[in-house]
Amino acid sequence: MTIMAENISHGTVYHNFIDGSWVPSVSGDLFENRNPANTGDLIGVFQKSTRQDVERAIDAARRAYASWRLVPAPRRAEILFRAAHLIADRKEALARDMTREMGKVLDETRGDVQEAIDMTYFMAGEGRRLYGQTVPSELRDKFAMSVRQPLGVCAVITPWNFPMAIPSWKIVPALVCGNTVVFKPATLTPLSALSFVKILEEAGIPQGVVNLITGVGGEVGEPLLSSDDVRVVSFTGSTAVGRTVAQQAAPSFKKVHLEMGGKNVIMIMDDANLDLAVEGCLWGGFGTTGQRCTAASRVVVHERVYRAFLDRFVARAKALRVGDGLDPATHMGPSVSDAQRKTVMEYVDIGLKEGATLVCGGHPLGGESHAKGFFHEPTIFADVDPSMRIAQEEIFGPVVSVIPCRSFDEAVAIGNGVTYGLSASIYTQDVNRAFAAMRDLYTGIFYVNAPTIGAEVHLPFGGTKATGNGHREAGTAALDVFSEWKSIYVDFSGRLQRAQIDTADL
């Protein structure tokens, strides 16, 4: 009988999953996982893995690939359908564990789990498609087609803010294409990752096809990047770390998929429905405590409605209740860690020094109700210049910069004036403006009369510039990350035919 966890005096100890078994790290070292809303709540103790653990997992995945790639894709998909059913059956328990683990409110963690359900069902459906092409040949008695083929062992490295959705975006398409996986989740959210892998095991994933290694980034990540047996690296995280991932993976010519930061904009025109825009900016800026790569951290407002919008936005932000995400009255949870909250506080100081006007929040929360967690007020800066650091750099916290503009063209220029290009939005009643904005904002995702968050699994997800390296997650675009094209020609003429040369015989 496999063991996923054991109870000891200082909490439940969870194991790695390697070659079909739940096993401790060879190091014997452990790390704690605590609730960011209540640090007295010990969620579990996890393996602090080493290079040797990673190498064992890679070797298991390499060996499993030999047989898994030959399993017909519809059969692989049947396992994923079972996994989706299991996730759906356990949605509430998984969501509650996730709220304890990373802090966002229960409605949002339910959405996170639902996204994993949706993605798993969607990708399982691709097991009976994985479409290629058939095309006419330029020669007689010759057949031409293309097919997808798997690549091998995939290293999946995921962040803490969507600890079940993002792993599903990567692992499920990798599996349906016939690859095997070594999964390194964020150190701050190992339980959600472990629960996802446990469900895959229960659904019938064969031994060695999926492997889970917990531990510190460099110690676990570097061997994944340097191993010649790993053929794909899919990483979501900061742009700085993504650059390192690309550099370390380059010598062995791995396929590298990077999904990194964002500094997303909502543009509010003078004909916008302001009440709707305020709702969108609240959700876009303070949902997940601003800890989303798609968070709406910049709001560009036409000068004709600037004051009216700002007054409503500030009033609504001040009314948000900050607290434990398991409390149904809570609107916004904590930062995921003390270090993340300190980053937010540092950027508040930067904004003040740059001369922006602090109109809401700006302080960490303490007192009896917030003393045990990493809470910070929803924070709004007004009269922000687009060149200020708070309007250029990703903060990953509940800080929104409101920037005035004089025209649609100026709003678009401000929107494009950052190093990132993930998501953007416009609020307007003018269909011509809306379509011009769709065309002119250089981002991977765009919304009209909706905030910059809320992507759906059946369309590609990803960004431009420093946000990514050209690949996309979700939708059928994800299959391109985890498969390669093979063009096949079948000549049944019984004689040599030379393409581009033997064209006279029509």
Image (cartoon, rainbow, N blue to C red):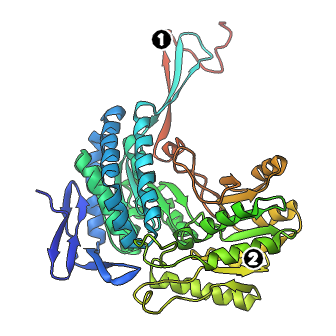
Residues at marks 1 and 2 touching, judged by CB atoms closer than 8 Å: no
Percent position of residue 353, x then y: 72, 91
Residue at x-position 45% and y-position 77%: 336
Residue 492: mark: 1
Residue 94: mark: none
Residue at x-position 51% and y-position 60%: 250
Count of labels in the image: 2
The relative height of residue 331 versus residue 74 in the rendered view (above or below) is below
Residue 311: mark: 2
429 or 68, nearer to the observer: 429
Q: Where is residue 411, by image quadrant?
A: bottom right
46 or 479, nearer to the observer: 46
Amino acid on which disc 1 is placed = Phe
289 or 226, nearer to the observer: 289
Percent position of residue 386, x then y: 78, 75
- Nearer-N-terminus badge (1/2): 2
Element class at badge 2: helix
Please, which residue is most extreme toward the left here? 1
